[in-house]
Image: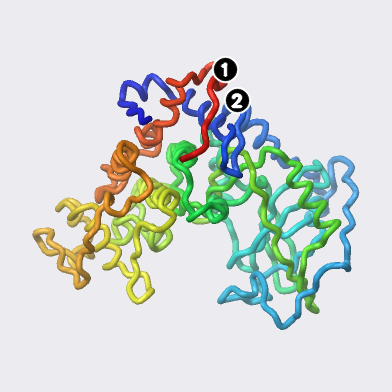
Amino acid sequence: MVFKSGAASRRSVGPAIVLTWLSSSFSQPSTMPALRWSPRGLTSVVRSSLARYVVSPLHRSNGTTVASKLLLPQRQFLTSGFVEVDISRKIEEEDLPLYKAENYYPASIGQVLESRYQIVSKLGYGTSSTVWLCRDLLENDYFTLKVCNKGHKPTHELAISDLLRNSKEHAGKKTIRLVLDSFEVSGPSGTHTCLVYQPCGMSFTEFQHLLPDNKLPKELVQRGIQLILISLAFLHDNGVIHTDISTNNILQGIQDPSVLRQIEEDEVARPIARKVLSDRTIYYSRPMPNSAGLLVLSDFGEARIDKGSNRGDIMPGIYRAPEVILDMEWDCKVDVWSIGTMIWDMVEGGHLFFAKKDRILNDEQQLAELVSLMGPPPPEFLQRSEKCRQFWDDQGTWKGSIPIPEQSFEMRARQFFNEDKELFMAFLRRIFCWLPEERPTAEELAYDDFLMQPLLAARLAGYDSTSCAYRVGWTKPG
C-alpha cells in the first residue's frame, strides 16, 4: 500500500518522529543480512553506539608521550604460521597504477603507534593511505586508523572535522564520521600523518554487492537516504559541502563492539596471508563484518567550506551536477544532485549516466544524456557560463555532435511499479533540475512523499512514536 503524505501530513509527523523512526528501523526484523531491528530511539542508539568513541588526551612532556593512566598490555601476534605470498606477485596497494612503495608507511600488525594505538588488522588501502583496525591501549577501545602517504597532508579534512565537532547540536551530527585524533609518525622515507576515526562496518557499495543484481530493497533505500539527508542538512547548516556523496562513503554503524574483538582474535589465532619483503610486509585486508548500526556519512577529504561563490572541479566524473560540468558557480545543491545519482544506483543496480565516449569521460556525452532526461535547459541557466555556447545555440537548441539519446526516467526505471513508481519519479524530478536553486534543500527532501512512505504506513499500522515501539510485525521485502 502506498501513502502520499502531503504537506499537512509531513508537518504532523515532525522531525522527532522521523528520527525516532529511522533509528528504530535500522534494528527491526528483516531478511536483509545487514540490518536488525530494535525499538530504540535515535538519541539512545546514537549515544550508545557513537558517543563512546572519545579519545582521551595523553600528557606530553619534552616531546615524549606519556599515558595519563596505565596502559593495557600489548597483544602478541604470531610471526609464523601464515600463508606467505610469493614476492613476485603484486597484491593490495601494489596493484594500484601509480603505486610507489616509498610513499606508503610500512605499518605492521602488532605495532604500537603514538604509544597507545596497537594495530591488530589491516582493513583496506587506497591511492593515498592504508587503513587499519587498532586497539587503544589506554581506553581498551577500538578505532580505525588511516595512515596517509608521505606528502599527503589532510589539513582540509582536519579543519572540517574541527568545525563540525564544535558546532551546535543537531541530529545529523551524530551520524557523520569525523577525525577524532591525529598525529605523525616517521617512516624510512619521510613523515606520515595518521588519522583516528570511530570504527564502522562495510560501505553500502560492499553491502550492495552481496545482494542479488546489486539492488537494494525499497524500504532500506528510503530509510537510508532519509538518514543521509539529515546528515547533509547538518553539514549545510554549518556551511560545509561534502561534494563526494556516494555509496562508497556511506558506512554501516557498529552496534556490537564484539565484532571488532573477533577481528583481533581471528588475527591472533589465524594470521592473515601476507607478502614479506626486506623493507616492509604487505598484508591482505580483512573485510569488515556486516553490521546493524545506523548508517554513517564518511570521508570529508573532498569537502569544501561554502564561501557563497564556489568554483572549481568537484564530484566524481559521472556524478557531476550540470553546473560543475559547465564551470559555473556551485553551492550545497551539488550534494542534493548526488543524492539523486546515488539513489538510482541503489535502486536500479547501475549508473544513471554513462557519460563516456570511447571509454573516456566526455562532457558532451553527459550533457546530451541530461537533456534526454530533463529536457532543454532554461535560458537563465545558459547565461551563466560561456561554455554553454559549445553545446546550445542562442535559442537553447542543442547543437552538439552527439545526438540526444531517446530515453526518459520512466523508460529507464525498472524496479518500481504503479504508485511506487509514481512517487519515485516525482522524487527524482525534484532533484534533477538545471537550476540549482530549484532543487530542494537536504532537509526539505528528507520529507519527500517517496521517503515518508514507510513511516506513514507504519503510523497507520500501529507505530507508537512516543514509545518508539512497533505493534505489528514486518514482512519480508518484496
Q: Amino acid at mark 2?
A: Pro
Whether 407 is drawn above or below 59: the answer is below
Q: Residues within 10 Å of mark 1 (few under 14, many from 20)?
A: few
Q: How is the image coloured?
A: rainbow
Residue 362 place in picture, x, y as percent: 32, 70
Mark closer to the chain start, 2 or 1: 2
Above or below residue 256? Residue 101 is below
Secondary-structure class at tag 1: loop
Residue at horizontal 15%, vertical 64%?
Answer: 398
Quick one: SS at disc 2? loop
- Please give the name of the residue rendered at 39% of the width and 39% of the height, measured from the top-left corner: 442
Looking at numbered disc 1 in the image, what kind of residue is underneath it?
Ser
Q: Is residue 323 above or below residue 438?
A: below
Q: Nearer the viewer, residue 86 or 193?
A: 86
- Residue 189, percent across and down? 71, 74
Q: Position of residue 303 (x, y in %)?
A: 48, 52
Q: Residue beneath label 2, please?
A: 39
**Looking at the image, which is closer to me, 431 or 454?**
454
* Discs 2, 1 touching: Cβ within 8 Å: yes
Q: Position of residue 295 (x, y in %)?
A: 56, 41
Residue 320 in view here: yes
Is 45 displayed left or right of 136 in the figure?
Answer: left
Q: Which residue is denoted by mark 1 in the rendering? A: 467
